[in-house]
Amino acid sequence: MGVDLGDLASKHTINLASLSGKIIAIDAFNIIYQFLASIRQEDGTPLMDFKGNVTAHLSGLFYRNARLLENGIRPIYVFDGKPPSFKGATQEARAFAKAEAEKKWKKALEEERLEDAKKYAQATSKLTREMVGESKQLLEAMGIPVFQAPSEGEAQAAYFVQQGAAYATASQDYDALLFGSPVLLRNISITGRRKVPRQNRFVIVEPEEINLEETLRTLGITHKQLILLGILVGTDFNEGVQRVGPKTALKIVKEHTTPGAIKKYVQEKYQYEFEEDIEAIIDFFLHPPIEKTSEKFSWPESDETKVRKILCEEHDFNEDRIQRTLEQMLKQYKEKTSQSKLEKWF
């Protein structure tokens, strides 16, 4: 879970069709965790094959990317590499939270509280090395480029957008903005009708586009102040200040513009001491480890035989459904990309 900017970011509702022909750099871990959390049975048990292997990540990647490709979108999946040393505390806290959620999940199952059970189960999601390997294999079989970042995937994706190699970074978190991505896309993998937890109603989730420059101009702050705002709320690398939400954090960074002034203010106002070196976190957002590459990405045709082998032979997916989806995906993708090339002439 990355930084939460709440309603501060300048969001514009779009549709997938408007992204046809555009290259989107996707934060792989962020998207895959969404699939592991959301693609579950009613009691919270993850989707599995007949051998007991979790397959939610494969199901999500296949069907959601099929939809992106059908809309003529060209995704690149950017995978995380080695995390910075100061992320260790966050990872330990997450591991503890997952363990606690698992206890609550089991208790809710015993008491037959299925809605609670599913909610707690979602918080137990774990992405293993094997899952990462399977995800890369499936994406490559679908003709989707995979890029291994040296550190944070969002930082590398932001670099691609800055360099014009991609149109936008896609992630549910706002960290890409802190890493300087000019454009961020949210909800591209969870569009559609979604049930509101604990309520008997549904909402329509639509893709959102967020422009960094517009957001900074609207808020009246600099990129560095946005990073300071994120640190106050909490990032992947530090725990936020209790009782400080996005709007309060915005007020603080406008009144106290340096890290030293902010540390002094929260110490006096909230009796809070940052355990992390916030100057190091700021520097990491401004100068993250990335691979500065001029690589031109290509999208070869899907290897249908390999896709069926991974999904159907190895993980028991329904072969007829997979084949229908592949045929529809390839047909629509070719039509959309041909149309996109034709429109460049007019």
Image (spheres, rainbow, N blue to C red):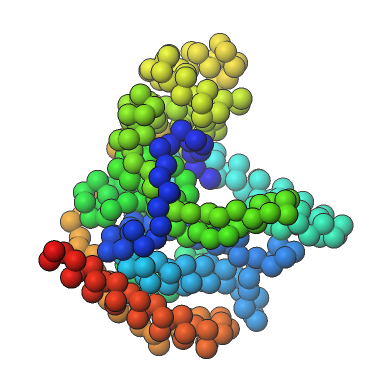
Percent coordinates x, y for residue 108 in the rendering: 81, 55
Percent coordinates x, y for residue 265 in the rendering: 50, 13
Q: Which of 86 and 338 is in front in this view?
A: 338
Q: Which of 292 and 242 is in front in this view?
A: 242
Percent coordinates x, y for residue 254 in the rendering: 41, 18
Q: Is residue 173 above or below residue 188?
A: above
Q: Residue at x 78, y 60 (%)?
A: 114
- Residue that extends furthest to the left in the rendered view of this protein: 345
- Residue that extends furthest to the right in the rendered view of this protein: 111
Asked which quadrant contains residue 26, the reply is bottom left
Q: In the rendered view, does 236 fall on the left or right side of 331?
A: right
Q: In this view, does 305 lie above or below 159?
A: below
Q: In the rendered view, does 2 fall on the left or right side of 210?
A: right
Q: Which residue is drawn at 29% across and 76% down?
A: 335
Q: Is residue 304 above or below residue 53?
A: below
Asked which quadrant contains residue 56, the reply is bottom right
Q: In the rendered view, does 39 fall on the left or right side of 7?
A: right
Residue 179, visible in the rendered structure: no
Number of numbered discs present?
Answer: 0
Q: Residue at x 56, y 11 (%)?
A: 268
- Give the quadrant of the C terminus: bottom left
Q: Nearer the viewer, residue 20 or 275?
A: 20
- Residue that extends furthest to the front in the rendered view of this protein: 346
Residue 10, visible in the rendered structure: yes
Percent coordinates x, y for residue 317 in the rendering: 56, 82
Q: Residue at x 53, y 72 (%)?
A: 59
